[in-house]
């Protein structure tokens, strides 16, 4: 009976860092969604320089920052509206007249994504640090679990 109780405690101690690591990975994925889209389909995108023509807000909610960008691709000029909520975290300028690097979809040039530098965002660094902490906790707890199992086994052998 006592062995089951110890096993449950050990499993819950091991699961806590695993859940936190998964949470951090999902958060990193959502925060860097554009970068992951480009990485998975990098042959479908081409890098282009765009110019911010206007900084506005969402016409419906009036809360979310939005920029209008203009770019040339294969002799045509395209205009697009992009939400600009997290992009300043990556060091992208949002003022009118500033230039941004974007990736344009070769098959649908009207669709583009911002070129975001993963390591410029301080939140990414913090998440990587927290991920490292939880990985080290997980490794420690797994090692401690093996040590505990070994000592329990030795105690049972002594009792026999």
Image: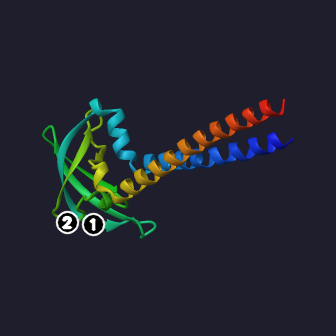
> Which residue is at a point 50% across and 45% down the rendered structure image?
135
**Closer to us: 140 or 116:** 140
- Badge 2: few (under 14), some or many (20 or more) residues near its Cα, within 10 Å? some
Residue 140 image-quadrant placement: top right
In the picture of the structure, the residue carrying the numbered disc 1 is 55
Residue 17 horizontal side relative to residue 33, left or right: right
What residue is shown at x 46% (from left), y 54% (from top)? 130
Q: Is residue 30 above or below residue 56?
A: above
Q: Secondary structure at mark 2?
A: loop
Q: Secondary structure at mark 1?
A: strand
Colour scheme of the rendered structure: rainbow
**Mark 1, other Cα within 10 Å: few <14 / some 14–19 / many ≥20:** some
What label does residue 65 carry, if any?
none
Q: Quadrant of the C terminus?
A: top right
> Could you tell whether 152 is left or right of 102 in the image?
right
Left or right for 158, reference 81: right
Find residue 139 and report its horizontal and vertical position in percent. Answer: 53, 42
Q: Residue furthest left?
A: 75
Question: Nearer the N terminus, badge 2 or badge 1?
Answer: 1
Q: Residue furthest bottom?
A: 62
Give whichever of 156, 36 is nearer the camera: 156
In this rendering, position of residue 2 left or right of residue 67: right
Which quadrant is the N terminus positioned in?
top right
> Are the residues at dot 2 and dot 1 in contact (C-beta closer than 8 Å)?
yes
Q: Quadrant of residue 110?
A: top left
Q: Position of residue 63 (x, y in %)?
A: 42, 70
Residue 11: x and y in percent read: 69, 42
Q: Which residue is mark 2?
A: 96
Report how far apart the C-alphas of labels 2 and 1 lie in the structure. Answer: 6 Å
Residue lying at 55% horizontally and 50% vertically, measured from the top left: 20
> Percent x, y for residue 103?
25, 42
């Amino acid at each position: 009976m006592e062995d089951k109780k110890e096993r449950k405690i050990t499993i819950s101690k091991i699961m806590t860092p695993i859940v936190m690591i998964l949470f951090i990975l999902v958060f990193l994925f959502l925060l860097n969604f554009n970068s992951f889209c480009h990485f998975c389909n990098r042959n479908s995108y081409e890098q282009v320089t765009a110019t911010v023509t206007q900084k506005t807000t969402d016409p419906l909610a009036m809360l979310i920052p939005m920029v209008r960008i203009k770019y040339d691709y294969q002799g045509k000029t395209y205009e697009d509206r992009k939400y600009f909520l997290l992009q300043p975290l990556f060091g992208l300028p949002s003022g009118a007249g500033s230039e941004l690097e974007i990736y344009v979809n070769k098959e649908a040039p009207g669709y583009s994504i911002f070129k975001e530098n993963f390591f410029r965002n301080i939140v990414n660094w913090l998440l990587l640090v927290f991920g490292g902490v939880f990985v080290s906790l997980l490794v420690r707890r797994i090692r401690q679990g093996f040590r505990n199992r070994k000592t329990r086994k030795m105690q049972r052998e002594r009792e026999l």
